[in-house]
Structure formats: C-alpha cells, structure tokens
Image (cartoon, rainbow, N blue to C red):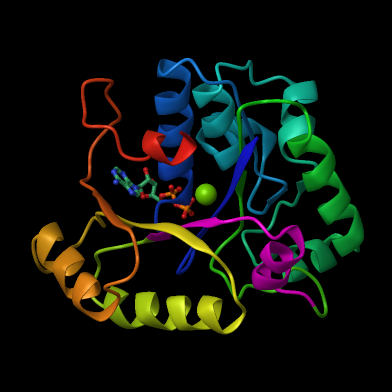
Amino acid sequence: MKQFFVTATGTGVGKTVVTARFIRELSAAGKTVNAIKPVITGFTWHALQYSDTGRLLSALDLKPEFENVKALSPWRFEEPLSPDMAASREDRAVDFDELIEFCRDTMANGSDVGLIEGVGGVMVPMDKTHTVADWITTLDIPCIVVVGSYLGTLSHTLTTVEAMRARGLEIATLVVSESEDSPVPLEETVETIRRFLPDIDLRSLPRGKYSPDQPELLVDLAT
Ligand SMILES: Nc1ncnc2c1ncn2[C@@H]1O[C@H](COP(=O)(O)OP(=O)(O)O)[C@@H](O)[C@H]1O
Ligand SMILES: [Mg+2]
C-alpha cells in the first residue's frame, strides 16, 4: 500500500480539496483508497456535509453516518482552534500514541492507497508537546504539501519546506492550490516557487469545482 500524509503551510489552504481530488482520481483509475482525517476541529454535526470529514466521506462515496464519521475522524472538537486548544476547551486531549496507533491500524486495511489529512499547517501543536511534524515523523510516510497562491505564500511555502527538510520529512509533491485572492496568475507563483525549490515535484491546481474531465493532478503518485 502507498501512503501519503497531506499537510500544508496553514489552515484553509486546500488540503481537503486536494485529498478529495486524489481520492476521486484514484477511484476513477480503479484503485481502492482509504482516507482519514483523524483530528478535526470546528466540527459540528449540523454542518457535517461542509466539514472536512463530510467532504472526504462524499469523495469516498460513503454515507454521512455516525459510524463512518467515527471511523474517519475519531477526534472531533467543536471549537475552530488548534487541536491542543480545541481539546482543552472540552477537558480532553489528543493522546499522541493513540493517534499514531489509529493511523497505523487504519492504514493497514489492504487498500491500494492510504491518505491521511493532517490539521492546519506542519507546525501546529497536537498536544502539549507534539506538532503535526512529529506526527508525520513518527508515521514516516511521504507528504503531499499543499500551499496557496495568496499574497504571503512564498515565505510560508519556503519556511514550511525548510522546516520539513530540517526534520528529514519526505515531500512527494507540493501542490499550489489557487487561493481566492491571488495577486498574480497562478503560474507566476508556481514558477517563483520552482526557482527556489528546483528539486521539488511541483503541481498546480487552478480554482474551481472538481470535474472528471480535468487533467489528472496526483494519480501518477500511486503507480
Ligand atoms: N483549488 C481550489 N479550488 C476551489 N476551491 C478551493 C481550492 N483550494 C481551496 N479552495 C477552497 O478554500 C477553502 C479551504 O480549502 P480546504 O481544502 O478546506 O483547506 P484545508 O483543508 O487546508 O483547511 C474551501 O472552501 C475550499 O473549497
Ligand atoms: Mg481540511
């Protein structure tokens, strides 16, 4: 099984869009795929369909039912904060060892591809001592890094890649997902990032709804 961890420069950049798209491309290519979003904050049941969990369930063609939600996202918190803060508002915590065990167990279900959507950006605290980067380091799987094209993304992107490289994290690809307010054409952002990160596989995802006739973005990673 091939596994990927989907992370980003920050929240709201496009991790769920990219993960959902990869799921749809894999299914269209006849591959079985398992995807999880183990920790979700800002989660409420009445807005399930708009949540990351709901959007991934839809891409996986699974019903938005309690059992499916639980299986995809066991750690759900209501406050739209970092996991550590959102959990503490409910007198709870994300147990790091349990999180790792959950990811390993779920990924071992025999699918062709396993995807884990992280939370926020790569340095977000998961608990009192661990960050998302520690989560990825422990799982030791390659990453899909999603970045935006908003003003400020260049520094966020280069900083994220430096932090990941310093920890020896593997970047399978970096996807520039077009932000709502992009100051320059998408390709200009991509070319600038390419100049500073010539060794990184770089892809771009223009803004828009998924449709099956769009060019494939990620499916080649699974072959
Ligand atoms: N390439 C894109 N095309 C269309 N909408 C996008 C794109 N990238 C991000 N968005 C939108 O931006 C918002 C944040 O994206 P999302 O995937 O939820 O980010 P993240 O998972 O990193 O928090 C969502 O409303 C999403 O639909
Ligand atoms: Mg998301």
Q: Is residue 22 above or below residue 38?
A: above
Identified at 12% across, 59% down, the residue is 187
The image shows residue 17 at horizontal and vertical percentages of: 41, 42
Can residue 143 be spotted in the picture? yes
Residue 92 appears in view: no
In x, y percent, where is residue 189? 17, 68
Would you say 209 lies left or right of 189 here? right
- Taking the spot 56% from the left edge, 63% from the top edge, the residue there is 120
Percent from the top left, x then y, of residue 20? Answer: 46, 34
What stretch of residues is rendered in magenta?
130-146
Please state, as top left, top right, bottom left or bottom right, where the N terminus lies in the image.
Answer: top right
Up the image or down, 93 lies above or below 78; here it is below
Which is nearer the eye, 155 or 64? 155
Q: In terms of image quadrants, where is residue 192?
A: bottom left
- Quadrant position of residue 66: top right
Identify the residue shown where x is 46% and y is 83%: 162
| Residue 203 falls inside the magenta stretch | no
Total numbered labels placed on residues in the image: 0
Left or right: residue 165 compared with residue 159: right
Q: Which residue is drawn at 56% across and 39% down?
A: 51
Q: Would you identify the image quadrant in which residue 139 lies?
A: bottom right
Q: Where is residue 84 in the image (x, y as percent from the top left)?
A: 76, 69
